[in-house]
Amino acid sequence: HQYGTNVIFGNGADDVQVIAAAGGGAATDLGGTPPDSRYGAVIGDFFFLGATATSRLAIKNSGRNDSAYWTAGQKDSDGQTFPDGGDVQGVTGLETGGLVFQSDTVRRMGARTDAAVFEFHRIDPARGTTSPYSITSDGDDVYYYSTTGFQRISGDGSIANIGIDAVNDWFKGDCNNSRFKAVIGAL
């Protein structure tokens, strides 16, 4: 994910890496103490990491305007471990906040103006995703393969079943069900 002049990436097993977007060269460890994480996203002035090595139920955010700062409680850096909803499967930014996709639910993240910095609200209590690579953003709309079929969530929190019954039924019937984690979304 591009954050400022850098590209930041991770795989959940190794240290989070950073490389200059324009200059290339070798990737190096991201500064500070970011947790090893599977998923990342730019949301406002922050870089978020999801499904951390210490908890697949957690997300962490960098300091404000500083992707190399990870000390909780300083520069608005913080984290959230969700008590339910399953493993974090992805994080994506919207114009007005972000979405956290878990295996059993989707949560909307909104900015606050107090010390809490962000707040989280469950917007889809029954349809998370086990297909993290299916999550694809187009402006304020996010498309993904949910536990019940193809979905769209808009920045206002509205949810639409875009697979309709026939498409979802065909896909479930024709797809190798053991490979749903490998469903890849593209615009």
Image (cartoon, grey):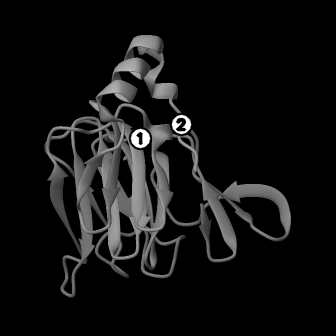
Percent x, y of residue 5: 69, 76
Which residue is painted at 22% across and 36% down in the image? 104
Task: Specify whether residue 24 is in view.
Answer: yes
Amino acid tagged 1: Ala
Q: Is residue 136 above or below residue 60?
A: above
Percent x, y of residue 7: 66, 63
Which residue is painted at 58% across and 50% down in the image? 187
Report the residue that reaches farthest toward the front: 166
Which residue is painted at 71% across and 57% down in the image? 28
The numbered mark at residue 13 is 2
Instruction: Work out how far the residue at label 2 is from the one at label 1, CA to CA, in angstroms.
Output: 7 Å
Asked if disc 2 and disc 1 are in contact, CB closer than 8 Å, the reply is yes
Mark nearer the N terminus (2 vs 1): 2
Percent x, y of residue 98: 34, 65
Amino acid tagged 2: Ala
The numbered mark at residue 53 is 1
The numbered mark at residue 172 is none
Alpha-carbon neighbours of circle 1 within 10 Å: few (<14), some, or many (≥20)? some
